[in-house]
Amino acid sequence: MKQRFWMAALALMGGLPLTAQSVVKLQTSAENAPMISKHLYGHFAEHLGHCIYGGFYVGDTAKSIPNTNGVRNDIIAALRKLKIPNLRWPGGCFADTYHWKDGIGPKDKRPAMVNKWWGGVTEDNSFGTHDFLNMCEALGAEPYISGNVGSGTVQELADWVQYANFKGRSPMSDLRASNGRKDPWNVKLWGIGNEAWGCGGNMKPEYYADEYRKYATFMSDWENTGQLMRIASGASDADYNWTETLMKNIPINMLGGVAMHHYSVLNWNKKGSATNFSPEQYFGIMKQALLMDELVTRHAAVMDKYDPKKKVALVVDEWGGWYDVEPGTNPGFLFQQNTMRDAMIAGVTLNIFNNHADRVRIANLAQCVNVLQAVILTNQEKMILTPTYHVMEMYNVHQDATQIPVTVNGVSYKLGTDSLPAVSASASKDKAGLVHVSLVNIDPTKSNEISLDLGSSNFKQVSGRVLASAHIQDFNSFESPDKIKPAVFTGAVLKQGTIKVSMPPASVVVLELK
Ligand code: AHR
């Protein structure tokens, strides 16, 4: 509030304009615009901290927390409302240590394991394949399984596919039936390892490409659905050579997707607090989030060389903000609060994905519950929705809608001598003909007057919702769970083919045009 007061006082003295102006143009008549896959709105649940155990899964015996087969009912309801399209599991780094056969059959007979990467905790394997795939059915989400390449075998992963997908009688489908599930789950999305350049085995790209070819060969699409999608473990950030080596060495017909990971982090050795951050740290994180545009553009350009028809998807299966853990929590559990800064990351990143929907067709926010940029935080029986949750819920109108290309001519958000575009936008038209425009003003010091140029389209009505708060550091807590939530937006006025939108500082707005 104090900061706002001084900004306002300065503006009155003629020092600073408090309102900036931008023009966003919708190309409503663009031809051959791609569909924005609903899978860009995917999530990620690793065996890490309290994402699965103590998050999604509270065990069959938890009495005080309503659950179905051990999975919290409140989480299922919240994620269904979000229209969660897919869920990636069991890792992350954990995936390359996970032996799926240890997680099936009677729970009291399952061997324990030590989670090497995340806190060295002992797990009892009580949440396994059936628990995950049944949970995905309850969520109405496609499962996205990350297979173990680093410490697993080709046979092990081939068996997992048969166990999940084979319809008739086979060693694995018989085993599945003996564990209580007759029908296959038909899992379509399969990752072949994770971060193979790092925790997944410290491989070189040439070596991994060969490993990939071998694994992919034995992962059969048993029912010939043509829908089994094999996804290669991808690059970290700007490692374009990784993508190039995979594209060059793996035949296109063996490759459904190539992954890429990018986290918005200030400095891996000094990440800073999730809630108590300076204007410089905020600016630095926004810069990292906006870098996603360059990363997907350049990885996509490499892919275009080998796959001009864009058959292979770019899969950003880990993204989000990464800060220091909350004071007093286990450093290996990656538990962090989630502020309006995270809402800004989510808004601009989803706009970038929408605008690159021709190539980016799957993405997974890291992670879903209690880890990194979570949409849900839990504490015993309490559950809260974060600002990031609200952005993802507001944006779900874009899922499987046709992209409307946009151009943004806006002012810059400046800090010292550095500057970033203040406004980010994307738009789509859904199957019912409704047009949605999502806008983000990342500048925490200025509102933004946006002229939305609608081209030749004739709309009669505009409505919308806004997510904003007094301070960029604001967050929802267990004591104040609804401090930040979407509100009806009254700042859009339609007049003669243009909509004037008054965006508050650091806000996300989603408009619906009819
Ligand atoms: O999301 C946390 C970790 O970040 C994942 O396990 C790993 O893939 C990445 O480095």
Image: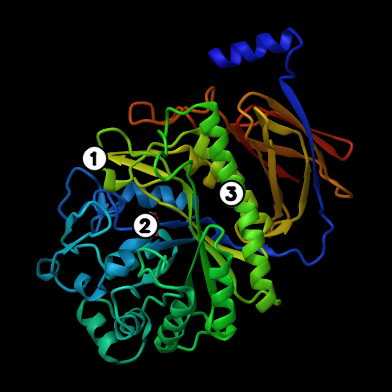
Marks 2 and 3 in Cβ contact (< 8 Å): no
Closer to the chain start, of discs 1 and 3, is 3
x%, y% of residue 38? 57, 60
Q: Residue at x 60, y 27 (%)?
A: 444
Please state the quadrant of the image where ligand 1 appears.
bottom left
What amino acid is labelled 1 in the image? Gln
| Label 2 within 8 A of ligand 1 by Cβ | no
Disc 2 target residue: 45
Q: Secondary structure at mark 1?
A: loop
Q: Residue at x 46, y 29 (%)?
A: 277
**10 Å neighbourhood of mark 1: few (<14), some, or many (≥20)?**
few
Disc 1 target residue: 380
What amino acid is labelled 3 in the image? Thr
Q: Secondary structure at mark 3?
A: helix
**Left or right: where 272 falls relative to 506:** left
Distance between mark 1 and mark 2 Cα atoms: 19 Å
Whether residue 91 is visible here, answered yes or no, is: no
What amino acid is labelled 2 in the image? Ala
Q: State the residue lying farthest toward the bottom.
A: 169
Distance between mark 2 and mark 3 Cα atoms: 19 Å
Q: Residue at x 75, y 19 (%)?
A: 17
Q: Residue at x 10, y 66 (%)?
A: 108
| Label 1 within 8 A of ligand 1 by Cβ | no
Pick the front one: 432 or 43 = 43
x%, y% of residue 62? 17, 49
**10 Å neighbourhood of mark 2: few (<14), some, or many (≥20)?**
many
Relative to residue 261, is residue 129 depicted above or below? Answer: below
Disc 3 target residue: 349
Whether residue 207 is visible here, answered yes or no, is: yes
